[in-house]
Amino acid sequence: MNGFRWLPILALIVSACTPSVASPPTPSPAPFPTATPLPALPEGGQNPYAPREADYLMEQANVYLNTVDLLIKESAPPQIGLTLAGALPTPCHQLRVDVPAPTAEGKIFIEVYSLYKSGQVCVQVLKDFDATIELGVYPPGRYQVYINGEYLGDFSSY
């Protein structure tokens, strides 16, 4: 029994020599983002569905597009618009429409998607949406518009 008397002391010495691994602190959940939209469109453009600075806090998902129309207003120079109708996967998803600057070849690759807060409990039902984005006036040239990689149409600006 004398050997068992030293067992707690031996355990204490061994544990003192073992390096401890601290777990990283758990970050506190960020509030639901309400940041302002990122860079603006060309002159006259308005996109209330533009990506926002805090979007990185959310998960990306698809949208279901039913109709997409390219609007070319008869003005000099022409003002370009876009109408979208479809459905979001749930009422908790937020619509985003990313309209980047045209490529050197005059192609505009518009991405339409949705965002949701991971872990948020939400009813599993589609939510219809109708969206209008005023793309504005583009510099002189010929442009081709693509939505999620699919050709939509083209226009000329002068």
Image: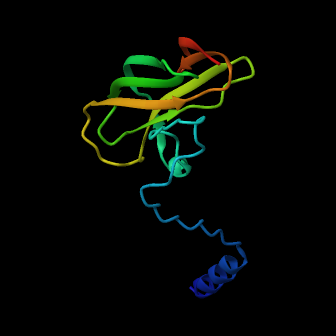
Q: Quadrant of residue 23?
A: bottom right
The residue shown at (45%, 24%) is: 82
Tally the numbered discs: 0
Front in this rendered view, residue 77 or 61: 77
| Place of residue 96 in the rendered image (x, y in percent of width and height, measured from the top left) | 46, 36
34 horizontally vs 44: left or right: left
In the foreground, 62 or 135:
135
Q: Which is nearer the eye, 135 or 13?
A: 135
Residue at horizontal 24%, vertical 40%?
123
**For the N terminus, which image quadrant?**
bottom right
Q: Quadrant of the C terminus?
A: top right
Residue 105 % position (x, y) = 73, 17
Residue pictured at 40% horizontal, 30% vertical: 132
- Image coordinates of residue 98 in percent, x first then y, are 54, 33
- Residue at the front extreme of this rendering: 76
Q: Does 48 appear above or below 21?
A: above
Percent position (x, y) of residue 21?
65, 68
